[in-house]
Image (cartoon, rainbow, N blue to C red):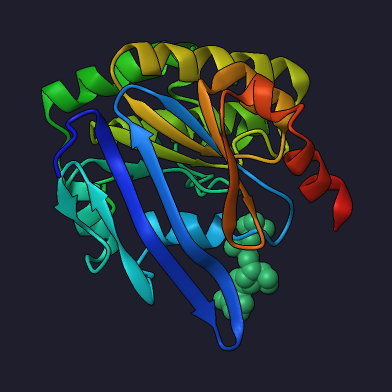
């Protein structure tokens, strides 16, 4: 089938580590234009599922489809090339390079730009400026990335991901380590980027953040989907509360 409203389609995916079933027959769809949350207690399989979508990890069973193409056996850079972007739980910026240099660093083939060898075109420089303004960090463009607050570094990482014009961005615990003021900023920026047409899948422990930023959420527990729907409804779902409090 080809529901053009579905951007990411995870079908019956299972992943085992030895005897442990980390992800167990998961079906999950991310609708084009949505901000979808993936939540669940520690050890429920969120990171594994994330890696099955963006990383080099292949499922034992099932398939992953992105924009109508099967991607579960592709190397990560090919997935990136198709329009799949990701951030990391702990930011991976080049701390001694400037903010601007970090934003222009990724190349479409998965390599990083060598500042000596890979010239920056006028349109790339202009796009980097635009993106830094979009995340509200234009005035920090020439600062060392490592001198920014952690929340600001997460925003630089988002600008960096946006440089390759992804249609879907997976955020791996964006709220982790970010102070409350910057958290508000992060919510605004995700909303703004989403309004410009980018779809998000957000893996996050911080349920209030998920409620604020996501229009739909999926709850994992022991490798299986136990609930999905609007986050404000899920927060009161007895099965979800049990999963969080029970283990
Ligand atoms: P979450 O991100 O929700 O905390 P994970 O996907 O990290 O959950 O883990 C799901 C389960 O799989 C856990 O029991 C974890 O210990 C196990 N697991 C994750 N990665 C590996 C691995 N590389 N090898 C063995 N077990 C793993």
Please indicate whether residue 111 sits to the left or right of residue 180 in the image.
left
> At x 27% / y 63%, what residue is drawn?
72
> At x 34% / y 56%, what residue is drawn?
11
Give the farthest residue toward the bottom. Answer: 18
Residue 195, picture quadrant = top left
Task: Check the image and report above or below for 220 versus 132.
Answer: below
Task: Check the image and report above or below for 184 versus 122.
Answer: above
Please indicate whether residue 167 sits to the left or right of residue 42 in the image.
left
Depth order, front residue of 11/74? 11
Residue 186 image point, x, y percent:
58, 20
Residue 113 image point, x, y percent:
25, 49
Residue 35, picture quadrant = top left
Residue 105 visible, this orientation: no
Residue 56, picture quadrant = bottom left
Depth order, front residue of 109/57? 57
> At x 38% / y 70%, what residue is drawn?
57
Residue 43 image point, x, y percent:
70, 62
Image quadrant occupied by the N terminus: top left
Residue 65 visible, this orientation: yes
The image quadrant where one finds ligand 1 is bottom right
> At x 63% / y 39%, what residue is drawn?
204
């Amino acid at each position: 089938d080809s529901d053009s409203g579905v951007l990411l389609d995870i079908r019956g995916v299972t992943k085992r580590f030895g005897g442990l079933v980390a992800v167990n027959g998961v079906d999950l769809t991310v609708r084009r234009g949505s901000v979808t949350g993936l939540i669940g207690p520690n050890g429920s399989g969120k990171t594994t599922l994330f890696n099955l979508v963006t990383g080099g990890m292949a499922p034992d069973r099932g398939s992953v489809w992105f924009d109508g193409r099967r991607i579960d056996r592709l190397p990560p850079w090919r997935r990136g090339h198709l329009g799949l972007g990701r951030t990391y739980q702990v930011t991976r910026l080049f701390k001694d390079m400037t903010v601007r240099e970090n934003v222009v660093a990724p190349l479409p083939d998965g390599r990083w730009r060598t500042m000596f060898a890979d010239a920056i075109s006028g349109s790339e420089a202009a796009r980097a400026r635009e993106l830094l303004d979009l995340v509200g960090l234009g005035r920090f463009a020439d600062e060392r990335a490592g001198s920014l607050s952690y929340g600001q570094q997460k925003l630089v990482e988002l600008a960096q991901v946006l440089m390759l014009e992804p249609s879907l961005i997976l955020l791996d615990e964006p709220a982790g380590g970010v102070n409350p003021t910057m958290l508000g900023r992060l919510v605004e920026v995700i909303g703004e980027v989403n309004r410009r047409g980018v779809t998000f899948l957000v893996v996050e422990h911080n349920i209030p953040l998920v409620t604020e930023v996501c229009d739909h959420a999926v709850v994992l527990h022991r490798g299986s989907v136990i609930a999905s729907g609007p986050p404000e409804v899920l927060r009161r779902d007895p099965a979800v509360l049990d999963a969080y409090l029970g283990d």
